[in-house]
Amino acid sequence: SSTAIPKAFPEQLGPFPLVEVRDLVMTVDQANRTFIAVEPFEIIEYLRSDPEGTQLTGTISSVAEVTLDASARAEARIPAEAVTFCFAYPIDKESLTDQQKGYFSTTTPAAAFMMLGGFVYFDAGGQPICYMALALGDSGLTFGPRHPCKKEWLEPLKGRFAEVTAPFIRDRAKWFCWINPREGPMPKNAHGCFVYLHNEDPTVHDERDCVFYVIQMSSLRAHAPHQGIIARGRASVC
């Protein structure tokens, strides 16, 4: 039988292996939706805009409840005590070329977290217990098919978009944002989704604008029994 060739963005998004970042030291301000990273030092030194600075400041989404079922959480290596989570947006150092960004994101999990973004998981007391980077690979966090982003959805999402930093997406989409589960104007958002905009102006709708919803294991099995939200696979930042 023939082997299907994986589609590329914007026909398909991911899958993204989730890789734990063990050497990342940062504080998360849920109220102001920011984070401050102070270690690992070599990553901070490479990405900081202030040559005299000792930390990196970034943006996070609002915090939401973890909605994945027990099986998906276990496969994703999300700690059982994780109750809520947020998405940490990547740090965009404009002086780097797309080629440099692409290479840097594959060097360590911390570099992938800073360059591609990642998820922060919190316990019942609101304390961070796990940082997971979005890595590149042929398995991992899985998304459903591409859905058009309707024009009327842009106004409720105004001000939430960040510039795309991922080299494999940057030459197509210009802006993106993470929408938490059951949040936003889109009706099928059970477990969160990424929205991508293509116009240079994020307030202007483009027919190419699209949404990719996270798919849980049970949903995938109903359509393709051999797949799962987190599959065993090799990430590029081991």
Image: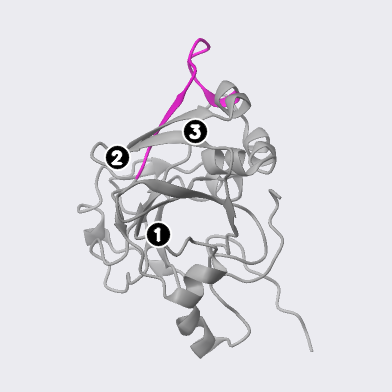
Splitting the image into 4 quarters, where does residue 235 fall?
bottom right
Three-letter amino acid code at the position of disc 3: Asp
* Residue occupying image coordinates x 60% and y 44%: 167
Three-letter amino acid code at the position of disc 1: Ala
Quadrant occupied by the N terminus: bottom right
Q: Earlier in the sequence, mark 2 or mark 1?
A: 2
Q: Earlier in the sequence, mark 3 or mark 2?
A: 2
Percent coordinates x, y for residue 52 in the rendering:
50, 10
* Residue occupying image coordinates x 24% and y 59%: 153
Residue 104 seen anywhere in this rendered image of the structure: yes
Residue 143 seen anywhere in this rendered image of the structure: no
Percent coordinates x, y for residue 44 in the rendering:
55, 25
Q: Determine which residue is flagged by label 3.
A: 92
For residue 82, the mark is 1
* Residue occupying image coordinates x 48% and y 43%: 164
Which of the two residues, 153 or 200, is positioned nearer the viewer here? 153
Q: Residue furthest right?
A: 1
Display coloring: one colour
Part of the protein shown in magenta: 46-60
